[in-house]
Amino acid sequence: MFKDKLNNLFGKKEDGQENNKRKIENLVFFVIILIITIIAINLVWNDNKQKEVKQEESDKTKVLATQNTTDTKINKDSLETKLENILKEIQGVGEVKVFINYSESSEVIAMYNENSQSSTTEETDTEGGVRKIETTDMQKDIIYQEENGVKTPMTQKVIEPKIEGAIITAKGAGNIDVKTNIIQAVEAVTGLATHKIQVFQMEG
């Protein structure tokens, strides 16, 4: 009977130690899971944040490109209108319509802040030779201007589309001298070669 009591006493101690050990193991496991979860959340959050910033820059650049495309269309229409007004003033020319053909749309060049860092490392091969490896890390960030709380990318320059040809219909163009004058006027304004300027007599 006394022996049974001793066994029960020591058995309970061993059980208590085992329970404490399990509790510590569970606690350590929980802490590890918590740390992994926090790291994963941070990685996902940072990745989403970077995507949002890139998307915002992309959207603003698209807005800038759209604005400049609209401006280019206005410039095209303006040039055609100016030519029509000029050609009407030529002797023998009546009503005039001008169409200008462009090779492509305009290209918007945004302004950037550029930061570059260079580093050089040396490696030694098995034969004792040494080679230098240079690496350059370049970062480009679009420069924005803020007006009335709205940020828009700053434009460095806009490359205008190239004029490829012109078609003119005009009353009076059936006369060879009038036609020649029209061609010379369009050539002077656009810089086109004469064979890229087509002039036709307007009906009516």
Image (cartoon, grey):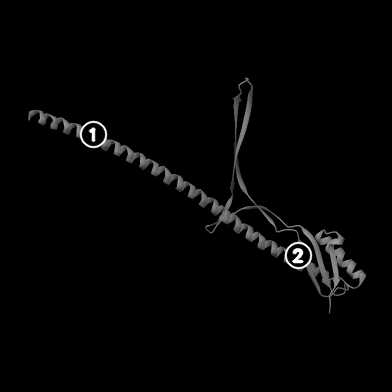
- Label 2 sits on a secondary structure element that is helix
74 lies above or below 27: below
Amino acid type shown at disc 2? Leu
Disc 2 to disc 1, C-alpha distance? 91 Å
The disc placed on residue 79 is: 2
Q: Residue furthest right?
A: 176
Residue 107 is drawn in which quadrant?
A: bottom right
**At which x and y percent is residue 94?**
84, 75
Q: Is residue 178 left or right of residue 105?
A: right
Q: Determine which quarter of the picture holds residue 89.
A: bottom right
User: Where's residue 9, x and y in %?
Assistant: 13, 31
Mark 2 or mark 1: which is in front? 1
Q: Quadrant of the N terminus?
A: top left
Task: From the viewer's perspective, tell me whether residue 86 is left or right of residue 68.
Answer: right
As drawn, 160 above or below 50: below
Q: In the image, which disc is placed on residue 18?
A: 1
Residue at (78% x, 59% y) in the render: 163
- Disc 2 and disc 1 in contact, CB within 8 angstroms: no
**Circle 2 residues within 10 Å: few <14, some 14–19, many ≥20:** some
